[in-house]
């Protein structure tokens, strides 16, 4: 298990969601040695326009050297 630390989280709320289930889709945009960057979009079920969008950056812990 990798314990990542959140270094940045930005959420843009674009509209009030309809009274329905919320659905989300995430995407890993870059996975480097030190950082992971992704984004996440949220919709009300049955609606085309998103209700929120987030961008996230995580700092990944250094792995222990073997040997």
Image: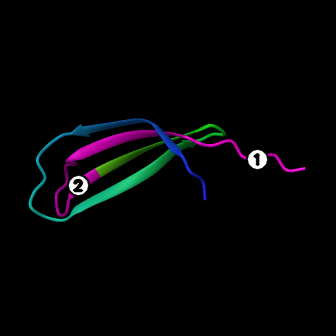
Q: Nearer the viewer, residue 10 or 53?
A: 10
Please, is residue 19 above or below residue 9 in the view? below
Instruction: Say whether residue 56 is magenta.
Output: yes
- Across and down, in percent, residue 25 comes to 36, 56
Residue ID for mark 1:
64
Mark 2 nearby-residue class (10 Å; few <14, some 14–19, many ≥20): many
* Callouts 1 and 2 close, C-beta under 8 Å: no
Instruction: Say whether residue 26 is magenta.
Output: no
The residue at 63%/37% (across/down) is 34
The residue at 45%/50% (across/down) is 27
Identify the disc placed on residue 22.
none
Q: Which residues are magenta?
A: 42-67
- Across and down, in percent, residue 59 comes to 55, 38
Q: Considering the image in quadrants, where does the N terminus appear?
A: bottom right
Mark 1 nearby-residue class (10 Å; few <14, some 14–19, many ≥20): few
Residue ID for mark 2:
43
The residue at 17%/63% (across/down) is 46
The residue at 76%/47% (across/down) is 64
Mark 2, secondary structure of its residue: strand
Number of numbered discs present? 2
Task: Quadrant for residue 30, please give it.
Answer: top right
């Amino acid at each position: 298990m990798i314990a990542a630390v959140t270094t940045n989280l930005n959420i843009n709320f674009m509209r009030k969601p309809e009274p329905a289930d919320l659905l989300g889709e995430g995407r890993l945009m870059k996975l480097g040695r030190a950082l992971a960057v992704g984004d996440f979009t949220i919709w009300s079920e049955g609606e085309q326009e998103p209700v929120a969008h987030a961008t996230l950056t995580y700092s990944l812990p250094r792995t222990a050297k073997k040997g």
